[in-house]
Image: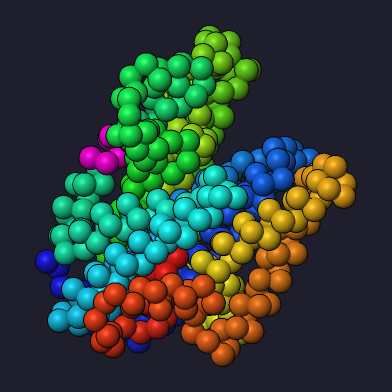
Amino acid sequence: MEKAAQPKAGMPNRIVAYDRARALAVVGMIFVNTCKIMGVNHFKPWWMDTLARLVTGRAAVLFVMLAGAGIVLAYDRAYDHEKPLVRGRLIARASWLCIFGMLLMLVWNADILHYYTAFIAFGVLLLDWRTARLKNILTMTVAASMAVCALVTYDIEGGQILEEVAAPGLMGLVGDYFFFSKYYPVFPWFCFFLLGMLIGRLERFPERGRFHLIFITSSLCFVGIELFSAMLNAETIAGRWVDIDLPLWRAFSLSEAFPVAPLFVFSAGASGLATISLLRLLSERKPLFGSFSPLAAFGRLSLTVYISHILIGTVYCRWIDNRHALATADRALLFSTVFILAGMVFAAAWTRRFKKGPLEMVLDALSRMFLPRRNLSLRPSTEALSDG
């Protein structure tokens, strides 16, 4: 097992950076999920539609990466004799998140919380593994994901191959749901979780130049992959030599999130790394408003915000259907903006009195219910990273 470095004076600022990153992830998911709830698929002008496409899926990738980083940070902040209890708490949190997610699926079929059970359960088993072994596992997982992503994308684009090889019975359904689902399958989404764990391990020996390099490299990769995908799907470029509507061509040329195409794995991973590293670099500069940060407060309430925007958005959409017959892109954008601004005001006021959000407090109490009653030596700001 690799030993973590002792906490340094700048640790609280770095935790705020991760809270802000989680807030950006939640903001993106609110926008994307609201559009899906209201059945909005296109925006005008074109740049708004392009922005919506880029945010789709990448916000959830950032959320998963931060979950991976969060369990590492929470684990590293505990004393050695308390680490078994930390692992138990993390498993308990994952189990309750699974229940929350299954209940949420009664109104929302694209929930991500119940997939956390698989991600965190596997992640907890790897907490004591050396970084080199984690990198090897990530490499193998990425390799397996390429085949799975190409197969699923090929099938959904018209290849019709999965139904011919799918196993019958309950095990076939479980395998199809966790490995060939349109939303958040284990491959490749566990890749993003592992990448987040590696980011969390960078905080054991943080170096300023390291995050500069990550930001520059990942930004260039993200832009390059998106331009390459656009060229492969442009009628005026690739369309001259190949039928770009062929399922096999689209399986390897798209950079889409649902289903996850192979190019998206690298594009989304790069965009997540760029966002986290940028916020980490900004955290090392003197904050404009002292220790107060509405964006960080919003990130601290990520679980509360995520669940509430699904429930409130569903009610709002049904009200629109009853009163106005059809939801529009403008109404989806209006709801997202108002909800985000109201959520930031609420989060800023709430965190002045409480260290955790309402549902985060419920989750924490439920997680402690079946575990020994001992106080962990975790700082609340770090412990909160593993809540959502």
Q: Can you give x and y, in whole percent of width and height, for residue 309 in the image? A: 63, 60
For residue 261, side relative to residue 236 (left or right):
left
What quarter of the picture does the N terminus occupy? bottom left
Camera-side residue of 12 and 33: 33
Task: In the rendered view, tell whether residue 306 sits above or below residue 182.
Answer: below
Q: Residue at x 51, y 14 (%)?
A: 246
Q: Residue 128's quadrant in the figure?
A: bottom left
- For the question of whether residue 241 can be seen, the reply is yes
Q: What residue is drawn where x is 55% and y is 69%?
A: 304
User: Residue 43's quadrant in the figure?
Assistant: top right
- Is residue 333 shown in magenta? no
Work out whether residue 34 or residue 103 is closer to the camera in this orientation and state it: 103
Instruction: Pinpoint residue 32: horizontal percent, then vertical percent.
Output: 62, 49
Q: Is residue 174 left or right of residue 257?
A: left
Name the residue located 35 percent from the left edge and 84 percent from the top edge.
379
Residue 155 position within the rendered picture, expressed as x and y whole percent measured from the top left: 45, 21
Segment tinted magenta in the rendering: 140-145
The percent position of residue 281, horizontal first and vertical second, equals 45, 69
Task: Report the predominant secondary structure element of the magenta stretch.
Answer: helix
Residue 142: say if magenta.
Answer: yes
Q: Find the residue positioned furthest to the left.
A: 1
